[in-house]
Each structure stands twice: as C-alpha cells, then as structure tokens.
Image (spheres, rainbow, N blue to C red):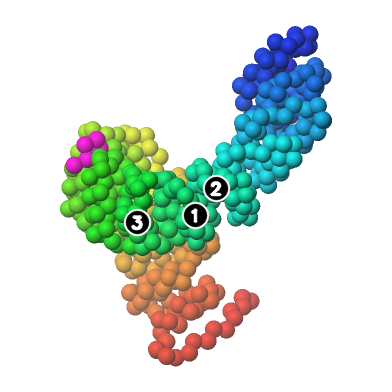
C-alpha cells in the first residue's frame, strides 16, 4: 500500500517525465491490494496527473495498474475499470504474461471468463498457463467443461499443466468418470496426474479402483512412479477398505524406494495400524521412526488408548514430555487414555497440567474426555456442573450424549431428563437419545414414569422409538399426529 501512495505524494511535474513512468510502473507493480476507496482515490490521482494517458503510458505501467485494480476491487468493478482503459484504439495491450497476472487476482470465475473473452477479442489468445489459472480446484462443472473444450480447440490439452488442472477440477467436482476419461486421453501422465485420480477415487469411496491404480502405475506406466504422496493416499485408502495385506505392500514399496523415512508416511502408518488394532505394528513403526515429532507421539498414544492400553499410553506421555512439548492433540490422547482406564486422579492431573504448565486452552474434545472420565467413575453431578457451568467453550451434542450414556449406566433418571432438555435446546435430539432415557427408566424399574416422560416431549421420533421397544415383531405401528394444547 505504501508503494502506491508514494505516487499520490509525487509532484505532477515529476510524473510527466519519461523516466518517472518506469518508476511509476515499478511502484504500482510492488503495491499490495488497496481498500476499494483508497484505490479509487489513487485512480483519480493518476488520471489527473496524466500518468495513465493511453498514448504516453508504457504497457508495463498500464498492466501494473490493471493488476492492482483487479486485486483491490470487487470483480465486477475491476472489470469496469479494465474495460474503460482497454476500450480506446490507442490503448497499449498488456502482454499475455501480464494478462495472466491480472487473471490471478480476479476471484469470480464468471468474471475471469469474461476478461479472457475480452482479451481474446483484442488479440490476446492466452496460453497453457492461462488455462491453468482459470482451472481452479473448485471450478464449477459448467466452467470446467467450457475450458476443457477450449483446451482441446487450442491444442493445450497435450500440455501437462492445464490437463492436470482440469483433471483436478473434475475430481473435486465428484465427476470420477469424467476424470477417468480425461486421464485416459492424456498423452503424458506424470505422477501428479496419477495422484489426482487416486484422490478422486478415494474421496468417492471407490477404494478398490484407487488401489488398482497403484498396480497399473507400477506395471504399465514408465513416465511416472509412485512417490511419497502416492503412498500416503494409498495408506489412507487401505484403512477404509481394511486391506491390511495391500497396506503392507505399499509400506514395503515405500521403504524400498526410500519413502519409508518420510515422517508423514510413518505417522500415517501409525494411525492406520492403530485403527485396525495392530498395536504391535504401531509400536514397531514408532520405535523405528528416527525423528519423532509431536504428531508421532500423539498418534501413537491415541492408538494405544483406543485399543485398551491406557496405562501404556500414559507411560508414553511421561516419556514424551522429556523430549517434545505436547500440543492439544497430545492431551486429547492422554485424557482419552485416562478415561478408558478409569484413572480419575491422573486425568485431572493432566487436565490441570495442560492449562497451567503448558498454557493450552481446553477445547470441547478435552472437556468431553473429562466428562467421559467422570461419567465412567459415577461422578455424574460433577460432570453436569462442569458442562453446564464451568466449561469455557460452547458444549455440543456429543458431550451431552456422553453424559446421557453415563446416566443410563448408573441409573440417574433425574439427571438424564435434564440432559435431554439440553439436547432439545440445541435442537440435536435424536431417537437414540430417548431410547437411552427409556433404558434409564427401565434400569431403575420405573417404566410408567418413562412413558409419562416420553409423552411430555411431544416427539414423533420418541413415539416411534418407544413403539419399537414394546411392539411385538410383524405388528404394524401407527403414529397419530401429536398436537400440543
């Protein structure tokens, strides 16, 4: 911003000289985006001083000004400025490179296409980089199809950059069939293109197709080989499919090609083995990791806690803080370990350590772990006070359901009713919540009160849930509209 305002303070006589035009261009090019009001003031000053005279201004100055306009104004107003300065026959057209710079600053895809058509009408056809700029990851399908046709017409589809950008657009739009057709048409497919298609299949739950691409990539494609990103994508896909053998094959490939030492790959492998209950493999990969980050420790501890090794997770935490400072995710793992192992005192100690020693603010997940810990230990009233009065973050439906589940286990009917009222306030109640409450009544032998309480909530969902509990099989269930009086 400071660079642009130097022009405003420069005397008019100085700006009219030829060398100063180059200085003005440099200052405009180095300026960052301005607030719209400031830019309009600058525009008026440049017009008044004659610096934007179409017959005297070099193309570099014009281009720098137009780029600043595109960055500072909303797209429709920026295009109005662009049209005004390009309308004169004496206008000096920006080069293709400068047009691409202007395109990068526009935010509205429809306005980008309008500017592209305007430049083409004036003789600037653009190049492969132009299409790559327009093909943003979240490009609308209609724009992607238009630009695809344009790339084919002008022969840019053979260029890897726009072709891969277009492939990413189809992938992010969920059009996996269109992405595959374009992929098969590409004359040269580099590793990035393969990774984009693997990501597309994985996001759309075509996990088997994603894994097949790995075999196809290794067996038939000579221009590209799987890299560390490929390994990460495939390890993620293996987890959703439960393909342990394939995961081991990907890991063997990663080690063979020196990707096994990549920290991201190792951390992901620890997480995926944890989710499948392969604790021994988790421990082995973790121990063989040379430079363990806080993510490595946190992932390993969370995996141990989730698989019933809470005390081992706590021991790992005690070892970790000797080398690495824990973060929020670390404390989520260790608090979860305390909850699963019933270690109430240790849980409170780590919670206080997080706030006092490491100055970390607890989030709703940390409070959820404490509520779960207190609920398992039967400290239901204390847990309710924590959520209702002491929490410094907004409670969500998950934390209330955690407490509701504890009420069912310990038969705390009155508190269960209060928890349900909070879920109703959040408009997050579900049929399963009422079933938990009904089971709480059943646990204390007060089914009649359960029925009465059920009616007070005026919920069709509750009526259906209760009917499913008490109605014999193959008997029809009819629900009349409940009207409050």
Q: Circle 1 is placed at which residue position?
A: 185
Q: Quadrant of the C terminus?
A: bottom right
Query: Is residue 80 depicted above or below 229 in this figure?
Result: above
Foreground residue among 123 and 463: 123
Mark 1 neighbour class, 10 Å CA radius: few under 14, some 14 to 19, many 20 or more: few
State yes or no: residue 307 in magenta. no
Place of residue 13 in the rendered image (x, y in percent of width and height, measured from the top left): 79, 8
Q: Which mark is residue 42?
A: none
**Quarter where residue 444 is shown:** bottom left
Mark 2 neighbour class, 10 Å CA radius: few under 14, some 14 to 19, many 20 or more: many
Q: Circle 2 is placed at which residue position?
A: 157
Place of residue 95 in the rendered image (x, y in percent of width and height, measured from the top left): 66, 29
Q: Quadrant of the N terminus?
A: top right
Q: Circle 3 is placed at which residue position?
A: 216
Mark 3 neighbour class, 10 Å CA radius: few under 14, some 14 to 19, many 20 or more: few
Place of residue 191 in the rendered image (x, y in percent of width and height, measured from the top left): 39, 46
């Amino acid at each position: 911003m400071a660079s642009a305002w130097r022009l405003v303070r420069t005397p008019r006589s100085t700006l009219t000289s030829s060398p100063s035009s180059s200085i003005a261009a440099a200052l405009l090019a180095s300026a960052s985006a301005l607030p719209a009001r400031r830019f309009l003031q600058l525009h008026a000053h440049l017009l008044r001083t004659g610096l934007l005279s179409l017959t005297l201004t070099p193309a570099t100055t014009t281009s720098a000004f137009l780029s600043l306009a595109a960055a500072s104004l909303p797209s429709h107003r920026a295009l109005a400025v662009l049209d005004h300065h390009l309308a004169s026959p004496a206008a000096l057209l920006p080069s293709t490179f400068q047009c691409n710079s202007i395109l990068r600053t526009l935010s509205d895809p429809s306005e980008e296409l309008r500017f592209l058509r305007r430049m083409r009408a004036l003789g600037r056809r653009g190049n492969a980089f132009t299409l790559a700029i327009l093909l943003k990851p979240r490009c609308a399908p209609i724009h992607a199809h238009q630009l695809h046709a344009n790339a084919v017409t002008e022969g840019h589809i053979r260029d890897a950059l726009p072709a891969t950008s277009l492939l990413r657009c189809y992938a992010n739009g969920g059009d996996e069939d269109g992405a595959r057709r374009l992929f098969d048409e590409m004359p040269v497919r580099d590793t990035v293109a393969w990774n984009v298609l693997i990501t597309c299949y994985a996001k759309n739950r075509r996990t088997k197709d994603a894994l097949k691409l790995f075999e196809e990539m290794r067996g038939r494609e000579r221009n590209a080989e799987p890299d560390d990103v490929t390994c990460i994508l495939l390890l993620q896909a293996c987890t959703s499919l439960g393909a342990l053998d394939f995961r081991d094959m990907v890991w063997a490939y990663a080690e063979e090609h020196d990707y096994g030492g990549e920290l991201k790959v190792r951390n992901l492998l620890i997480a995926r083995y944890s989710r499948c209950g392969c604790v021994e493999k988790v421990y082995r990969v973790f121990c063989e990791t040379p430079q363990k980050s806080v993510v490595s420790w946190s992932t390993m501890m969370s995996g141990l806690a989730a698989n019933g090794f809470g005390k081992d997770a706590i021991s790992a935490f005690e070892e970790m803080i000797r080398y690495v400072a824990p973060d929020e995710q670390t404390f989520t793992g260790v608090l979860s370990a305390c909850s699963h192992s019933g270690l109430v005192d240790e849980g409170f100690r780590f919670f206080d350590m997080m706030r006092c020693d490491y100055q970390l603010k607890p989030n709703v997940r940390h409070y959820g772990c404490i509520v779960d810990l207190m609920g398992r230990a039967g400290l239901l009233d204390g847990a309710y006070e924590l959520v209702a009065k002491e929490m410094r973050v907004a409670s969500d439906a998950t934390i209330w359901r955690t407490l509701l589940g504890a009420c069912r286990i310990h038969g705390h009917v009155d508190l269960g009713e209060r928890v349900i009222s909070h879920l109703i306030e959040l408009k997050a109640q579900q049929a399963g919540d009422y079933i938990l409450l009904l089971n709480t009544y059943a646990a204390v032998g007060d089914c009649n009160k359960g029925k009465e309480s059920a009616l007070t909530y005026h919920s069709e969902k509750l009526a259906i849930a209760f009917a499913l509990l008490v109605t014999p099989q193959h008997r029809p269930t009819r629900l009349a509209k409940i009207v409050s009086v």
